[in-house]
Amino acid sequence: MENIHNYKIITITHKQIQLKKIGRYVLPNVDTPEAMGDHLHALKEQLGLSELMYLSTCNRVTFLFTCSAPITAFFKDRFFDTVYDYLTEEEKVEGKDSAGFYEGREAIQHLLEVASSTDSLVVGEREILRQLRTSYEQCRTLGTTGDSIRLILDTAIEVAKYVYSNTKIGEKPISVVSLAIQRMLMHGIPNDAHFLIVGAGQTNNLVAKFLIKHQFSNFTVFNRTLSRAQDLAHRLDAKAHQLEDLADYKGKVDVIIACTGATEHIITPELYHHLVGEDRSKKVLLDLAVPNNIDPKIAELNDNVRYIEIEHLQFLAKQNMSFRKKEMLKAKKIIAYELNSFIKKFEERQLEKALHEIPQQIKAIKGHAVGNVFKKELNGLDQNTLELVTRMMDYMEKRCISIPMEVAKTQLVHKGSKRQAMSKRAKQRILRQLITDNNNEAV
Ligand SMILES: NC(=O)c1ccc[n+]([C@@H]2O[C@H](COP(=O)([O-])OP(=O)(O)OC[C@H]3O[C@@H](n4cnc5c(N)ncnc54)[C@H](OP(=O)(O)O)[C@@H]3O)[C@@H](O)[C@H]2O)c1
């Protein structure tokens, strides 16, 4: 039976380490579902985990898993040696020293905080909920998660939605992307500037919305998969190309926005010089990827280059945080309440699962009695007596199964409905408390 202490999280986030260093801990070469599946299944086996989910965003790398072994110093060493066998000893030690390790109740609380965006770089941004769902769906489809992670993910999503709709944490929403665009606009980019957009995933699609809003109009899109480049280019009224053709690009470049899941630099100093040639006018490079897609050396080598990476957004993110501080406190109260509810729900679920095992266990006892314990005596019985004994045993089996099932089910239904009723009342109480705290602060 699963235990609440089996929930574990090992995570490296913007809170513990510089954003640009997080990229090192993003798993490389898992950019296809097959590669991700093979890798996660191998890690599960090597580390003896029951379930495993992996999440990588621009400000966190998180492993959510279940296993009965506690997170000891030995476990931490084994985890980093296995997951990060390609890193240097120094990088592994830095990762270990900076990582957050959570078990049981703390792990559940951490996940609820992540989903509700109270642990985010940009507090209140809902993008994390989409990323959590996408990662969970991917891991579920790959078969690396099971009932325990499903249960906690369902709760985390429900709690996050509750927090978003009952606090002002997500009011006047901002995101990492909107902060990046704010920062980019500080460089006074003219509306006829030419943008090279590298990557056509969710993030660059969001970037596109802001570019249109700010009335930029000259774009060329490059992406690994041409069809996705074409979709984005269509929205931007731009040309689309395959990423491998970037080196052949001959057009003008004023701004490069790069954001892909590649774990190596796409815009290298050589490619950059090829793209801009002798043009010495100001260039803005916006790198939204973690790890970086644009080699930071380009900015060191060229004084006309303005390089913006996610790391530079931390100051703007802190300003956003102070606006949302009061709402964070409200969200934390909701999370504390929901954490206790989840623990009860989890225990009920374990009881439910244990009940499912009763019929098999009783059947097995009967089989053992017939096949081993009373085998000799039964063989000595005449046909009629044997039939009678068998019928009696079948009857006893059915009764033995039904009695505990009925008692436990009544208990579960009673507890469940009581919990639901309590939960509604308690939630309303919490809400009333939160609402009395009149926070009409504006951005
Ligand atoms: N979501 C956010 O709020 C946010 C904010 C800031 C930064 N980021 C960062 O943005 C990056 C991409 O995130 P996303 O949300 O846009 O992901 P996504 O929707 O999954 O898109 C991934 C993009 O990266 C491309 N790609 C993946 N692996 C590649 C490789 N090995 N070589 C070249 N291209 C590759 C994909 O190309 P295909 O179309 O060919 O698959 C696609 O264009 C990540 O580093 C993430 O941390 C995300």
Image (cartoon, grey):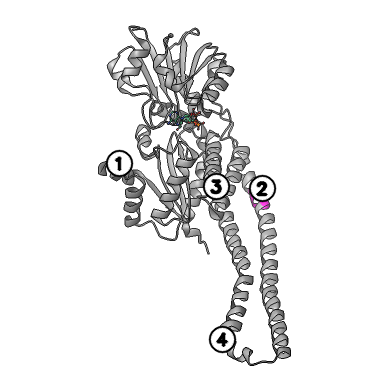
Amino acid marked by disc 1 = Leu
- Give how far across and how far down residue 267 sits, in percent: 37, 21
Q: Nearer the viewer, mark 2 or mark 3?
A: 3
- Ranked by sequence position, the earlier of labels 2 and 4 is 4
Q: CA distance from mark 2 to mark 3?
A: 34 Å
Q: CA distance from mark 3 to mark 1?
A: 28 Å
Q: Nearer the viewer, mark 2 or mark 4?
A: 4
Residue topped by disc 3:
140
Q: Please, is residue 137 above or below residue 233 in the view? A: below
Q: Let me know if residue 155 appears in the view.
A: yes
- Ranked by sequence position, the earlier of labels 4 and 1 is 1
Nearest the eye: 406 or 103: 406
Q: CA distance from mark 2 to mark 4?
A: 58 Å
Q: Please, is residue 250 above or below residue 318 in the view? A: above
- Ranked by sequence position, the earlier of labels 2 and 3 is 3
- Does the residue at mark 3 contact the one at mark 4 (Cβ under 8 Å)? no
Residue topped by disc 1:
87
- Ranked by sequence position, the earlier of labels 3 and 1 is 1
Which contiguous range is marked in magenta? 424-429
Using the image, tell me which numbered label, if any, was put on residue 428: 2
